[in-house]
Image: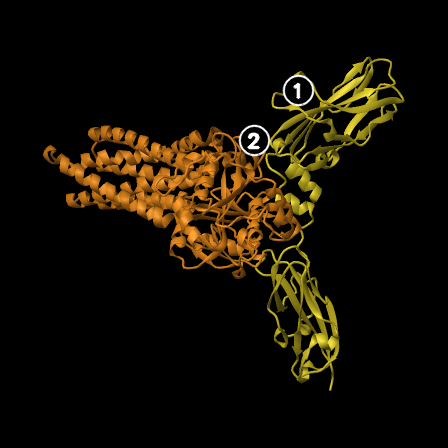
Amino acid sequence: MNESVKKYYLFFTLFITGAAVMVLELAGTRVVAPVYGSGLFVWASLITVALTCLAIGYWIGGKIADKKPKFGTFYLIILVGGILIAPVSQVASPVLRLTANLGFRLGPLFSAYLLFAAPLVLLGMVSPYAIKLATNELKVLGSTAGRLYAISTLGSFIGTLLTGFLLIPAIGTKKILCLQSLILILLWIGYQLINKKYSLGLSSAVLLSLPLLFIFTYFPPRKESKKIRMLYKSESIHGQLKVFEEGMERKLYLDNMRQSSIHMNTYLPTGEIYYSFELLPLFNPGGKNALLIGLAGGNIPRRLWEYGIVTDCVDIEPKMEYIARKYFGFLDYFGKIYINDGRSYINSTKNGYDFVVIDVFTGDDIPFHLLTRECFQEIKNLLRKNGILGINFMGEIYGKNSLGWKSVYQTLHQVFPYVKAFSLLKGSKLTDTVSNVIFFASTTPLKSPEDIRPFCKGSLPQHIIDLFLKCELDIDSKEGIVLTDDCSPIEFLRKNVSQKVRQKQIYYEPERYFLE
Amino acid sequence: MFRLMIQKALFMAFLLFYFAGSIYGQSRLTAPGQIEISMVTIGQIYDFKKISGTYYEVANYVQDGLKLKIEPLIPSPDRLASKEFEPIPDLSWVRLDKEEFTLKYGENTSANFYLTIPDDAQLLGKKYQFNLSVYAINYPRPLSLTTQILVTISEGRISPMELIQKLELNELEFDLTPHKCLLSNFPLGKKIDISQFTGKPFELSNQSEQKYVFTLTVSSSTENCNLEIPKNQRGDTDFLTLDSGEVILESYASKKFRPCLSIPDQENYRDKELVFLIKAQVLGQIPEQSRFSIIRVKTGGK
């Protein structure tokens, strides 16, 4: 075989395997996210698994390379790695179920080891092996190793960009892993063809591609539950989106965290918080338009429309518009939908608003840049006279982990002289329990709850508003910190809110939580 | 449906019938040993029979004509089922539907009780125990049984979904009238306002608590209509026009509309019976809910 062809094929191989490591790591977070979210623990777990497995791979790869520096063995390692990646998405669900009892630290870590350790170790073996194969004499060892590392890192760079920016939202995790497996297997086949072992190359191409094609195209029938029906499932940049029908409720989840829910017959929202924003038109009856940051299923615009308010909705997730219109009955009458980052929209819009609502819980985190003093100042500039800002925040109300909502309160007070906060858990003294806190802030005094109670429309909203009005929170002015663009440790102040919500869901709704 | 939801989704009452036998020779009195009621919410009154689907049953294998009394009791701290539970703060939370009864030998009776959870946020997430004591009043020796009732109060208040059921807002209510109308001797070749022709106004009414956008269309499909129309009687949808396509109706509001029918003056439409359907539905709703107005037309002859 021509040595230079072999050499360039080796470079190409290293480029691909470099990409494969990062693809596996990024796709891995998506595999684990539906059960464990995409927060700090999941990322830390995947990085830990990748680093430990690569370290083991480097060590073993170096040893084998010294003993048996053969191209055949080198490509065999890649072949096995490729074969092991193919079934990851198929076995993920039982593995995640198995580890769910380990909690939100050990669970994702063990899942990631079980699912990704073997292919990552094999991919780790590739680099030292390639260096050995490419080095003819010791005096050029440094430049050879440098070149190979550069090529591999370039591959990782391209793999990261492709996976994160394009592949995950476009084709989903299962197909990415399948394609990755196929490409690694093709490297082995390519080597056989270069080596003029045509029959071995072609027969293995057929033999190995068939099961892959099956995995690529086969979607096992959904385990339909009597109670729960999945209407929609899609991968997106921000997580896995699912729409369920459960009894008479239709619910939208992002990475298994509920975003919206409606009663199927009446389209009445089935979460209290959507009604709580009805206080906005009651505080300011003259208001005609609103800006909602965080569309999800569009419950809030539907409710505000009852009061003649048209709502411009901004959501960073492009698929939300389709879901809101198709499954949650979002109508053009409610307002326009803009796909954009909330802060970016606030900065660029020339519209003025009577109300601004921030309701931006993604699967796990609240975007910190929407809860800073600077952001509130920008919102204040958008608000008309008597305008009100409303925020839905999730956190613990009592105890040592309650600094989250108290900090948002203090930050709002830096910009708005009048701030009110409500929580249905008020008075419970429950610590370790997560609840919604609804904030209202304005430059003009907010009416007394007693004054607005009679004006609420409909018996259900009236009932819920009544509940909220009994639940205004009091705060000690010394508690909490002011959040700024420069320093906003809101995730640390909220302390694992999403994990607590997930734990509760796994306990109370395991059937829905693990439904694939 | 409501009861089922309450039973299954909200309360999950688990009954553990450890029939605690209090045995005096051959005689025996039986009642459940422990009953667990979970996920009750503050500010609600619960009917034990409704949430559990069963009664609290006491059976007498002691003697004929045994007089029994049931009484709720606050358990002493050392007699609690587990450390998680604390004694119920007030016995007024429990109301029995009957306190005394007489049983023949081998007979059993069903008692029911009501549990009132005060609307106090401090109770959220709490676990309480009370005991129901059944004892004989006309038996020479002490004869009694105790049932532990374990109550877990939900961390949340009543959910909107439960309120939707409770307030009976679970059905979308709207109507399209008249449901049926018959136009006899209908003239051909003229555009006729059907409301004027029949003297009946066509009206769409929203009888729900919230505002909806409705669409009014002339439908060629009888799906969801429970009506079979022979093919030769189906009126051409182009013949019937409506002055409104989309109608926004506030809660409990209605709107009149005018359907106009124009059948060409052609031989093949003379002395014919044709059926037209006007359909109203909530815009964008899946699954579709629709109401129909069926218009039967008998055209005139020459």
Image coordinates for residue B110, horizontal then vertical, percent: 80, 30
Image coordinates for residue A229, horizontal then vertical, percent: 57, 46
- Secondary structure state at the residue bearing disc 1: loop
Protein chain holding label 1: B
On the rendered image, what quadrant is the C terminus of chain B found in?
bottom right
Along the horizontal axis of the image, is A283 left or right of B52? left
Along the horizontal axis of the image, is A244 left or right of A341? right
On the rendered image, what quadrant is the N terminus of chain B found in?
top right
Residue extending farthest bottom: B302
Image coordinates for residue A368, horizontal then vertical, percent: 40, 42
Q: Colour of chain A?
A: orange
Along the horizontal axis of the image, is A65 left or right of A254? left
**Colour theme:** by chain
Image coordinates for residue A374, horizontal then vertical, percent: 38, 46
- Residue A212 position by quadrant: top left
| Residue B179 is at least partly visible in this image | yes
State the residue in front, A126 or A194.
Answer: A126
Closer to the camera: disc 2 or disc 1?
A: 2
Q: Colour of chain B?
A: yellow
> On screen, B234 above or below A117?
below
Q: Please, what is the three-letter code of the amino acid marked with disc 2?
A: Lys
In three-dimensional space, the C-alpha distance between marks 2 and 1, rounded to whole angstroms, equals: 23 Å
- Secondary structure state at the residue bearing disc 2: loop
Residue that mark 2 sits on: A429
Residue extending farthest left: A139
Image label count:
2
Residue that mark 1 sits on: B80
- Residue B80 position by quadrant: top right
Q: Please, what is the three-letter code of the amino acid marked with disc 1?
A: Leu
Q: Which residue is drawn at 32% across and 48% down?
A: A162
Along the horizontal axis of the image, is B166 left or right of A401? right
Question: How crowded is the residue under tag 1: few (<14 C-alpha within 10 Å), some, or many (20+)?
Answer: some
